Image: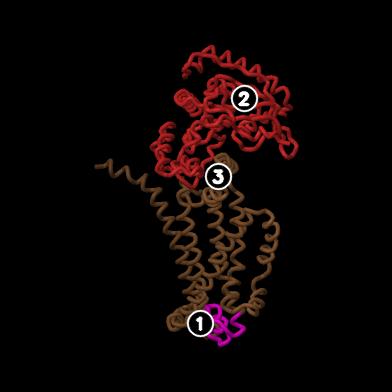
Chain colours: A red, B brown
Amino acid sequence: MVDSAALADMDTDPAGSVAVSLRGVTKVYDNGVAALGPIDLEVGRGEFVSLLGPSGCGKSTALRLIAGLGAPTSGTLRVARAVAEANGGHPVGFVFQEPTLMPWTTVRENVRLPLKLAHVPPSGAKVRVDEALAQVGLSEFADSYPRELSGGMKMRVSLARALVTDPDILLMDEPFAALDEITRFRLNNDLLALWRNLRKTVIFVTHSVFESVYLSQRVVVMTSRPGRIATEIKVETAEPRAEDFRTSADYASYCRRVSNALAPAYLGQST
Amino acid sequence: MSTPDLSPPPAAQPASGNHAARVARFMLPIIVLAAGLGLWEFVVRVNDIKPYVLPAPSAVLTTLIRDWDVLSKSLLTTLLTTFEGFAAAAIGGIALALLFNLSRWLEYSLFPYAVVLQVTPVIAIAPLLLIYLPQTTAVVVCAWIVAFFPVLSNTTLGLNSVDRNLAGLFQLYRASRLQTLCFLKLPAALPYILGGLRIAGGLSLIGAVVAEIAAGSAGAGSGLAYRIAESGYRLNIPRMFAALLLLSAAGIVIYGLLALTSHLVLRRWHESALGKES
């Protein structure tokens, strides 16, 4: 019953302008719960898109489908082939809501994992691990164990692990939701800086209006049960964004617009 | 002059309190032991109790030294059996758990029998095993039967306790089954496996002793348990105590070694092995 095209990720050539494309994608779980769709979504190469919505709106489900963790029930899902795929790269990097680190080994080994699984020789892997750790500012903590790090630092390790394969697409599933606000703001800024430097495509799932507006070029507002796209709002503001954007009138008005767009999504819910 | 004198005490107070607690933790059981032994010796001497009724601790110690040749050989035999049973239990338990993890059908087919083997008292199985197997093998098999179940069930529990997101991550990076096993499932299950092994260590000694006693009554064997049975028939009560003492010591050493191994392996990352202060 699965559309055969749904399983084939890739015909798009690396030079194409579309990174991820979903056409009429639905997901129905084995227990009959319709979690998603049908939704249509196109994310351009190098774009920073947020999926925003109440919990249970299928935004995480959509992200997992894009990552290849589970197949869509119907519809077509295309993910552009990674430029770096040839040298042990992987088209997508995934950052989970929790840091999801292996507690039994060091930061360095955690970051090296995707390369180890792709059979990249240790000598070549070391350079890339060091580079990824430097990108998130954790070079000094390479030999620490996850439990020795703060929540924000663990999240950075998780980010470094997603970056180590040099993916074209970075999928982030409410990565900063569990952090305190100060740490979250810092990580928001660092993520924006990384995105500007590395020009990755980022799909960022969040339930925070403020975070989605601050980070993304486009906010995709979703409704729940089953998850559908309610509306999309482009955030067009002077780049590069920095702390002063957070306090600008522009930011406030975008937040209001997004909040208003989100309100009907909540009306559909019983809670 | 006065400042250095004043500052240390507040800092030293909790430290010395800690130190005292640590010394007490070691000393109190030793004091209890000494007091117990002293009382025992005193009661035996004052009442002039005969050694074949209740030997004094000193008599047990003398016997231990005098019969060291016989007892040490028996100790070695028992330890060897225990070790063989333990090794078989560790390898068999872990291997079976891995198979169960790979194939649900295999788990459904065999797990009930593992439980049956576990709940049937080994002392009841031992005589049968002694009929069908050579005696040395039967003893090892007994040790294995008692010890393998905790390893199996703990390893199974551990393999099923893998963080779901980490499993997703391995899937995302297209890890092979072998990679997932080696880099994810086994390390995640390690604390559980070590817990199972710690229980299995003590149990394999029990299994060995039970089988030796069963075998001993059949007239063969030379392990410590057999010595206890034999000394019982001869009313050589001091030697019974001496052999019992060695068995306890062996059990303590086995437990200590396994606990130490577990601590050394897990100390960098697992909650169970971390100090309370962190």
Return the residue at label 3.
Answer: B175
Task: Look at mark 2 in the image and give the residue it sits on.
Answer: A52
User: What x and y, as percent, mark residue B60?
Assistant: 48, 80
Vertical placement of residue B150 versus B12, above or below = below
First to last magenta residue range: B215-240
Kindly check if marks 1 and 2 are in contact, taking CB atoms under 8 A apart as contact. Answer: no
**Dot 3: what SS?**
loop
The residue pinned by badge 1 equals B239
Which amino acid type corresponds to the residue marked 2 in the rendered image?
Answer: Leu
Seen from the viewer's position, the closer of residues B127 and A150 is: B127
Crowding at label 2, few (<14), some or many (≥20) Cα neighbours within 10 Å? many
Quarter of the rendering containing residue B136 = bottom right
Give the main secondary structure of the magenta stretch: helix
Question: Of A175 and B252, which appears nearest the observer?
Answer: A175
Q: Name the residue furthest bottom.
A: B234
Mark 3 residue crowding within 10 angstroms, few (<14) / some (14–19) / many (20+): many
Chain ID, mark 1: B
How far apart marks 1 and 2 lie (CA) works out to 78 Å
Residue B225 drawn in magenta:
yes
Q: Mark 3 lies on which chain?
A: B
As for residue B171 lying within the magenta part, the answer is: no
Amino acid type for the residue under numbered disc 3: Ala
